[in-house]
Amino acid sequence: CKKYVQCKDGETVGELECSGETIFNQSAKYCDWSSSTSCAATTCPKRMPISSPTASIIVTGPGIPAGGIESPSTETSGYCPYPCPKDYTGFKTRPGTQCKEYILCENGNLVDELECSGSTTFDQNSQFCESSSSTYCVPTTCPEREPISSPVEAIAVTDPSIPVGGTELSSTGSIHDCPWNYSGLQAKPNCKTYVQCENGEVIGEFACNKDTFFIEESRQCETTIFGEEWSCPQAPTTSPSPNSTQAPTFKSWFPPRPTRTPRPTIPKPTPMPSSTYQYFRSYLEEREDMIKSVVFQSNGSPSTAYTFPDFMSSLDIVVSQLPADKAFFVGEGASGRLPKLSGMEYGLVNIAAFLSNAMEEGIRIDSCDEWNTDSMFDGLREKFPLSNACGQYGRQYEDEECPEMEPFQCPATTMEITAVDGNTEKNAPPFTCRARIVDDGREIFPGYYDSVDYAVIQSAYANTLGRTDIEGCCWWGRGALLTRGRCAIGKLDKYLGQGAVERGIYVYPDINFCTNPEVICTHEKTNELRWVLGMLEWSDRVESYADLNTGWNYIDELKKFV
């Protein structure tokens, strides 16, 4: 499942490979994490031998029946050479697929082909895959588009040395003969053969007569242009045969052939919310005032760092945009306790457990950043080591890496970052991380904060872990659960940041969370990010928790509790 092929009308038009640790997910039709899918063994399909490539032209010549070979009709085979309406940009149901498949068009050109998962079908109005029970499939017909002109002279094969009907395409062969998104006829380097392209893919390969060559400007097989000798770009010099005149000298007057650029990553459309999640969301929205008055409170006042609208928009992201095994659990796919009760009950208890933890972490202190609280007493003086940025209460955040099967932790690098929020109850300054500073051979230590003198004392004062420096200590807690460590931040980047672009996920494509984790608290979307980070940690660490020795796991125990 590391490699997969792109097929069009039963023909292989491309062979691709998943990057990194991903494998091809046959159901989702894209490269996914191995933890999210399993590799289903496939066998070679039983097919009749292919005699010639499918093309929207008629081929004539020796051995070809009168009338030639035509491409199958749309009515009999479902074949639609140009599924995108002229100049159309956007998603559209693919003709003849009963709304199970849809396409992405750009200016009338086909950019990508996609398929709805499970029992969902594509809804043209909402532009989402929805439950087939909640939408009505409106069949679409193949748009009427002008066919690509193809002169008979250019396809009549009379030279016995040239295969009739052109050469068959291989799975890794000539797809790069066509420029990106180009539809039309394109010469091959020797100008004796040419290809027919459709949206940048080869659908037919043909040859000119013995003494003619394919001219790109006229799109025909000719001998001369305006009575003069013509040239073929990048054509090799040929030696004359003993019984012929000197072959023409080739001059490179054609413009260079377009360079085919790699297919860009196309953002996956956001799936339409399931009925379970729609009910779940409505249930919370109807109780917004109650939730705000009870949950979103900090020291008896409404929280300013954590609000209900940001909470709801973040929930949309972690339910729909994360891999299946990381999506926040709202009861999807679970049956209720009693008949006619949905699994939404389990989801509501799960979100209540999450919010109760958030109330004890970020919401209580109304802060995006972790505070310096792991203090030590020297007589009556309470001291807060600034090296607590490296870790508090026995934790060393920099050393917390991901499991071997998910090696997504951020690299351990030296950065200079200062937190936005500090301990407002004790007036301790915000956490800071930086490289070691040595002046005249003497190291300048960050020191500690003295809560009696309200001052920072620079000295070699160690925290409970023995650290006196703050180099590499940029992984303090952030967000609703004050999520800490290189692993958690690395997963945020891999699933929703720049690292997720390779999967077609464009939630935060401009953010590299590993190069600046404090962007969680400073970005224009910080009010959303601080919720997203906490929800991801909850789904990754809590919802997936299982004790292999006892068989205890969170989801089963949650259902028992409900």
Image (spheres, rainbow, N blue to C red):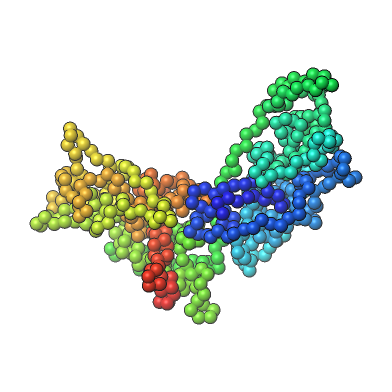
Residue 68 is situated, as x and y percent measured from the top left of the image, at 86, 45
Q: Is residue 479 visible?
A: yes
Residue 260 is situated, as x and y percent measured from the top left of the image, at 62, 37
- Up-down relation of residue 404 to residue 238 (above or below): below
- Up-down relation of residue 224 to residue 319 (above or below): above
Using the image as rendered, state which of residue 457 and residue 522 is in the foreground: 457
Where's the C terminus, which quadrant? bottom left
Left or right: residue 359 versus residue 59 is: left
Residue at image coords 40%, 66% = 545
Residue 435 is situated, as x and y percent measured from the top left of the image, at 27, 41
Q: Residue furthest left?
A: 379
Left or right: residue 162 versus residue 498 is: right
Q: Residue furthest bottom?
A: 338
Residue 298 is situated, as x and y percent measured from the top left of the image, at 30, 62
Using the image as rendered, state which of residue 67 and residue 458 is in the foreground: 67
The number of numbered badges drawn on the structure is 0
Q: Is residue 427 visible?
A: no
Residue at image coords 51%, 72% = 334
Where's the N terminus, which quadrant? bottom right
Q: Residue furthest front?
A: 242
Left or right: residue 214 versus residue 170 is: right
Residue at image coords 35%, 51% = 486
Q: Quadrant of residue 370?
A: bottom left
Q: Residue furthest right?
A: 66
Using the image as rendered, state which of residue 554 and residue 95 is in the foreground: 554
Q: Quadrant of residue 251?
A: top right
Residue at image coords 76%, 49% = 50
Q: Quadrant of residue 163?
A: top right
Using the image as rendered, state which of residue 308 and residue 511 is in the foreground: 511
